[in-house]
Image (tube, rainbow, N blue to C red):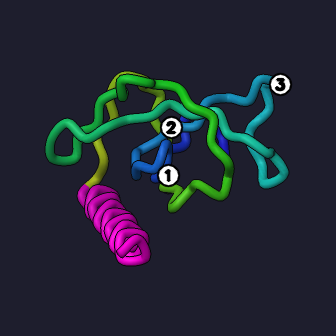
């Protein structure tokens, strides 16, 4: 994965669009990296994502849900192709359902 690679990842328990930042060493990220430095983006409209209120994060590679085959050089806004946007919506809905089920199970144990 190289600088500018766009992906979907879980950041602070939310499904977000992320963009890979170049590693501090100047090399690209690889599977052995313990952490990935990323820019984070939140939905703004159809296919459009703006830099989030906390625009930089460090995530574990296991937080990546999918990596898209394209890169972008911009850091303030990303527009996803239709297929990538649909994948984002599906993963976000799946993650939301999982969180709701965990909440229901936890709540049921308290009764």
What secondary structure prevails in the magenta region? Answer: helix
Residue located 25% across and 41% down the image: 43
The quarter of the picture where residue 40 lies is top left
**Which comes sooner in the sequence, label 2 or label 1?**
1
Q: Mark 2: which secondary structure?
A: strand
Q: Nearer the viewer, mark 1 or mark 3?
A: 1
Viewer-nearest residue: 75 or 51: 51
Reading the image, the residue beneath label 2 is: 19
Viewer-nearest residue: 99 or 43: 99
For the residues labelled 1 and 3, the Cα–Cα distance comes to: 23 Å
Question: Mark 3 touching mark 2, by CB under 8 A?
Answer: no
Residue located 24% across and 58% down the image: 82
Residue 30, image x and y in percent? 77, 48
Residue located 29% across and 52% down the image: 81
Residue 55, image x and y in percent? 45, 24
Start-end of magenta stretch = 82-111
Dot 2: few (<14), some (14–19), or many (≥20) neighbours within 10 Å?
A: many
Say whether residue 28 is magenta.
no
How many dots with numbers? 3
For the residues labelled 2 and 1, the Cα–Cα distance comes to: 10 Å
Dot 1: few (<14), some (14–19), or many (≥20) neighbours within 10 Å?
A: many
Say whether residue 101 is magenta.
yes
Question: Mark 2 touching mark 1, by CB under 8 A?
Answer: no
Residue 56, image x and y in percent? 52, 26
In the visual, does 47 lie left or right of 22?
A: left
Residue located 50% across and 37% down the image: 19
**Residue 25 disc label:** 3
**Which comes sooner in the sequence, label 1 or label 3?**
1
**Residue 9 disc label:** 1
**Which comes sooner in the sequence, label 3 or label 2?**
2
């Amino acid at each position: 994965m190289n600088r500018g690679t766009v992906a979907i990842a879980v950041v602070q328990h939310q499904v977000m669009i992320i963009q890979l930042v170049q590693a501090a060493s100047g090399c690209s990220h690889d599977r052995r990296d313990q952490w990935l430095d990323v820019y984070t983006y939140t939905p703004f409209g159809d296919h459009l994502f703006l830099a989030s209120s906390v625009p930089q994060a460090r995530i574990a590679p296991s937080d990546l849900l999918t990596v898209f085959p394209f890169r972008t050089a911009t850091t303030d806004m990303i527009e996803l192709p239709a297929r990538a946007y649909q994948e984002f919506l599906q993963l976000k809905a799946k993650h939301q359902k999982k969180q709701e089920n965990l909440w229901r199970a936890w709540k049921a144990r308290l009764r």
